[in-house]
Amino acid sequence: MSTAPDRTAPTWAVTLTTDPAAFLEQAGALLAADPVVTSVVATVTQRAAAEDAAGGPLPDHPRWWALVRDEADEAAAAAAAGAAAAAGEAGGPGAVVGAAMRTAPFEPHPAYVLPMPEAAARALARSVHERGEHLGAVNGALPAARVVAEETAALVGGEVVVEEHLRLWELPGLDAVVDHDAPGRLRPATPADVATCVAWWTAFAVDAAEQGGRDGAHPMDLETEEGMARRIERGLVWLWESAQGEVVHLTAHTEAAYGVVRVGPVYTPREHRGHGYASAAVAQVTRRVLEAGDRACLFTDQANPTSNKIYAAIGYRVVAETANLLVR
């Protein structure tokens, strides 16, 4: 007796593009469905699309975005195609169930993976491998990022090493903000503060590495003077001034993507710690974000109990676990 094929079994299709605008058109619904968890991909891709539109030079490192679709999910695919057509967007075969990007300008150019079914994550890893690319690092949401890393390691005969285990937090609303007092005031950074902000940005990266038991600052945590000047111009960097007018703390944040702002980095020089500047600044910056109608989230290193305690006291709650993984 013959058995009819199971039309509900997923058939994974992985498509890659080097065009961030095209990716946003097709992944928009996925990114908007859980904008806190997808915040990193959304902000990076929107910035890349804006830079491309402005005629910026293309990077000389790997840069692509991937969509994973379930081609067997005919009903969801039809609904997605209809929604895309109604919005004037480009659609694709199958329902989008996951996404990833590889845009980091530093070695080993880690991919960033969003949540997706385990089998879809394995299909993504195999697709990249078949392109002749080696993913030496995979960051992103667990367990999907781990599955991509493990499948990659199996394909190349390597192993997966956890470089950093992170927590993603969100403050659920204005009523949940717990304000903290500290002497002085919060003010936006100005062009005159560029050098100080770059130095503190770097110091934050070094401190974060030390507290996490890692050697050296992570390249993704560094910033140039030119990049800092752009951040300051867009109102994304805040400083705390002491009662004596001395700058003693920095808190920054991203621009909103799908209604979500990501707070960080947060840094107080060692000689100014212990006065509550970080708690006061993050609470005020978060309140400003929420009052503007956006949601606020941030990442912490699981190995840093101090930052985890501070943000919990302000009202942030853990919503996801992520990791930075190496494939060796």
Image (tube, grey):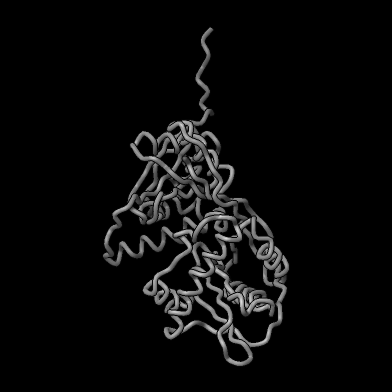
Query: Is residue 228 among the parts visible in the rendering?
Result: yes
Q: Quadrant of residue 182?
A: bottom right
> What residue is drawn where x is 36% and y is 33%?
130
Q: In the shown orientation, is residue 140 left or right of residue 15? A: right
Where residue 195 sits in the image (x, y, percent)? 43, 79
Where residue 201 sits in the image (x, y, percent)? 49, 71
Relative height, residue 109 to residue 297 (above, below): above
Q: Nearer the viewer, residue 13 or 194?
A: 194
Relative height, residue 299 to residue 64 (above, below): below
Relative height, residue 253 to residue 189 (above, below): above
**Which residue of the protein is positioned furthest toward the top in this rendering?**
1
**Which residue of the protein is positioned furthest toward the bottom in this rendering?**
244
Relative height, residue 33 to residue 159 (above, below): below
Where residue 155 sits in the image (x, y, percent)? 44, 31
Query: Is residue 284 among the parts visible in the rendering?
Result: no
> What residue is drawn where x is 38% and y is 41%?
15
Q: In the shown orientation, is residue 178 left or right of residue 68? A: right
Q: Quadrant of residue 183?
A: bottom right
Q: Nearer the viewer, residue 41 or 190?
A: 190
Where residue 314 sits in the image (x, y, percent)? 70, 70
Quadrant that contains the N terminus: top right
> What residue is drawn where x is 33% and y is 37%?
132
Q: Across the whole image, how many numbered discs are drawn on residues?
A: 0
Q: Nearer the viewer, residue 244 or 16?
A: 244
> What residue is drawn where x is 55% and y is 55%?
214
